[in-house]
Amino acid sequence: MGSQSVSVEYLSAGANRQTAVADWSRGGLLAFGADNNVAFWAPKDPSQKGIAGLLSGHGDVVKAVTFLPEEEGDDASYLVSGANDKSLIIWKSTPDNRGHELIHTSHDHTGAINCIAAIRLGSNQPKWLIASGAADATIHIWSFEFDKLELLQTIKTTPKFFPLCLSLNWLGDDGDVLILAAAGTKDIIQILTSEAKTEAIQFQVQATLRGHEGWIRSLSFARESKKPGSDLLLASASQDKYVRIWRFHQGQELPAATADGAEPSSGAYMPGKSPSNKAHWIKAAGKNFSVTFEALLLGHEDWIYSAKWHAHPEGKLQLLSTSADNSLAIWEADPTSGIWVSMVRLGEISREKGATTATGSTGGFWTGLWSPDGNSIACLGRTGSWRRWEYDAAEDMWRSCIAISGHTKAVTGIAWSKNGEYILSTSLDQTTRLHTKWTSTGANTWHEMSRPQIHGYDLNCIDSISPTQFVSGADEKLMRVFSEPKAVAAMLHKLGGIGSISNVEAMPDAANMPVLGLSNKAIDAVDDDAEIQPVDDRDRDAMDPASIVKKSQLDIDRPPFEEILSRATLWPESEKLYGHGYELSCLAASHDGTLVASACKASSLNHAVIRIFETERWTEIRPPLAAHTLTATRLRFSSDDRYLLSVGRDRQWAVFQRAADGDETPYELLQSNPKGHTRMILDCAWAPVGDGVASRPLLFATAGRDKQIRIWSGKTSAEGKIEFAQAAALSTGVPVTAVDFLSRTVEDKYVLAFGTENGAIGTYLLSVDGAEAREQPLPATMHLPKTVLQLAWRPSQTSDAATAELAVSGEDSSLRLYAFNNDFLQGV
């Protein structure tokens, strides 16, 4: 049984909001930190598969990621990552180049690592110099050679600041002087140099550049041209809304413009401190260098998070800046005057930013990256999603391209639509997202296709009522029911073959969120040429101009880009279900879609009840079901809806049976076991009920903090009443946090998937009476670095399917879809 029996179908994870969190390698891989993981994405891959892999090794949020500079003929590529857990990890590409493996971990820093810079020292024998800056107010200089990392120097910042950005380069043409620029939580840039050809590389502070009036977020070095003796330029991006460019010139004479006494401002008014043209002198390896202020780039309206150079093969030098004002700009020097001009501006126009951070302002761009060839740029927004543009030389314009998105906090709930066509995920990042397969072009890749809910509370649970309706619960006392709008239904049908176009006429056009509201309201889509009125701040139901949905926005032949996802794919809220006294903890919809059961956080019998709502008139059916004394953690309907199972923190499980048709209450307590586990029960699942229900006992599984999965089997007593008794106790050695049964049998056996508190995932093959069980663990590369929060097998369309798909949601903000072939499921 090889690992090829289990494959990764889809990975979704949002990037961490840090400036240094991503890098684009020479080989075309973009690596970024996604919670504890390092994610890999090949943006230019024609298959558009999205995230290709997730590496786990850090114990906390990853903040800095850098590829070591590569050259032709290298045997392997290396990646360095730093995180909040104070560790620095070096990853090496595997011989088949399909992934990376951890080769070294260092814990020398005593604070979170914020930034990493690297430079290659040797071509024949690969050797690199790495600088890392951390929240312990130090910069560490490392040497990396023969897969070994060695600490060369620890530099304490004086005056004390936390480094947020570093940049390394050669000073001069001779390759004998290294220069390091460091900046962070002060408004100064420190310039350090070291001789490269000495036995021990030691950096010394040579100059302090002043001028910025805020923290400095990004530094980038580049040669002005490829000519020998050309000057070195340093770009610094700051929270003062400006980018400054500094010139490093070799020799005892100042560069021409300064020598002539020309002020960079040319007498024009310039904001901030007057850009003094004082020259700083650096002496290193017997050579003299001057540092002068070159240019101030004005144009952004908010903090600037990153500035990165790219030298094009024909010699053109461009600077990419990204800002919290939701725009990115590409700057280059005018060939005749030398003045730096913004040539391209991408992102959002001021008028469209919107008044709500939920749907309007994306909170700015946190980092911008050039592709290795300079024909594509990628940037990361507040929602953890990437946006990408590619240069179209024929039309001389930048075009938006398909990128990736994902949750930025723990994914608390997942639910397949009743027919398994799409999956909904909900998270503590206050969004609900719909993922499905893009089939219209034959790509057959998974993508986020809609963001039905963007909320103001952390979302805890979700379930699908019908193919066009779902219900979700958050840290509030009510549940909200959402119905699919016409525009999204048409898009899903076009891109994924979901649903039929015939039943969309009754649906609302689209939805938006009022400026001061939490409820998505149904709205009419407008024509592209319709005039948009400015927002009236006094009107509580005023429509945010940014969230108006145009008819053409979802009439597309590819998955929607982030700007459309976050604005035009909301689902209107059709109902609110009240009744609970505290925040929702779990909910479940019956398989026939007629009932919704829910429970809330509770510490008393009065609140630990299960409330049942019917979906025809959306009213609660009283009295509520009482059994638990503390919070119920999971509710599950059996596949034929005859039974409702609940488990809770009070260590008990309860089974409710469907009452006779004439009864007012739909369910009544059949059996409860107050000592179901010795610790709290965290999840439960029903085995599928087949046609031969008379011959097969009813079976369910419970998972607890007592490190056990218990299987309970139902037998009919003499009075004709079903009684459940323990059939097996499966010990896992770790608290079990999630379980789910495959909805069909394999070789007349049940397949039970389980996930644990430490992120391990596995399956059990169970006999139909539940007495015999055989474990089949998944490969370690498929485990999560944090707790598995929920598992959900895809409802199978056929009983003899060759594969089964399992959705996994984790505390590491990832949603994963694993495909199992029947060999694995049968234990072959």
Image (spheres, helix red, strand yellow):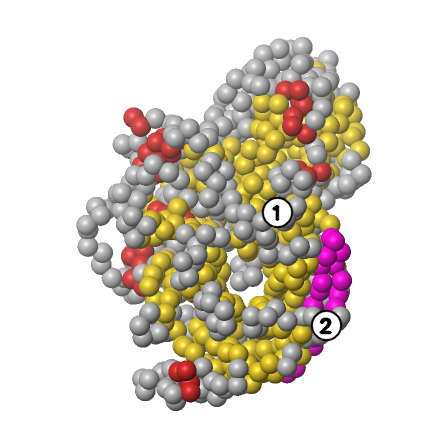
Q: Amino acid under label 1?
A: Gly
Q: Is residue 618 left or right of residue 599?
A: left
Residue under pointer 1: 73
Measured as percent of width and height from the top left, residue 199 is found at: 75, 70
Q: Work out whether residue 592 can be spotted.
A: yes
Q: Magenta segment range?
A: 134-160
Magenta region, mostly helix, strand or loop? strand
Q: Name the image quarter holding residue 200.
A: bottom right
Q: Position of residue 217 (x, y in %)?
A: 52, 69
Q: Name the residue under label 2.
A: 198
The picture quadrant where one finds residue 311 is bottom left
Instruction: Return the residue nearer the eye: 677 or 431.
Output: 431
The amino acid on which the numbered mark 2 sits, given as a three-letter code, is Thr
Which residue is rendered at x = 72% and y = 72% of the image? 198
Q: Dot 2: within a 10 Å radius of its alpha carbon, few (fewer than 14), some, or many (20 or more) residues?
A: few
Image coordinates of residue 340 in percent, x first then y, are 36, 72
Q: Which of 143 and 771 lies nearest the eye of the viewer?
A: 143
Helix, strand or loop for disc 2: loop
Q: Is residue 182 above or below residue 426?
A: below
Which residue does the image show at 56% across and 58% down from the upper left?
A: 21
Q: Does the magenta segment cover residue 147?
A: yes
- The answer to whether one can see residue 539 in this image is no
Residue drawn at the location 42% of the way across and 52% of the way down: 376
Nearer the observer, 114 or 697: 114
Badge 1 vs badge 2, beta-carbon distance below 8 Å:
no
- Does the magenta portion include 318? no
User: Mark 1 falls on what kind of element?
Assistant: loop
Residue 303 left/right relative to 204: left
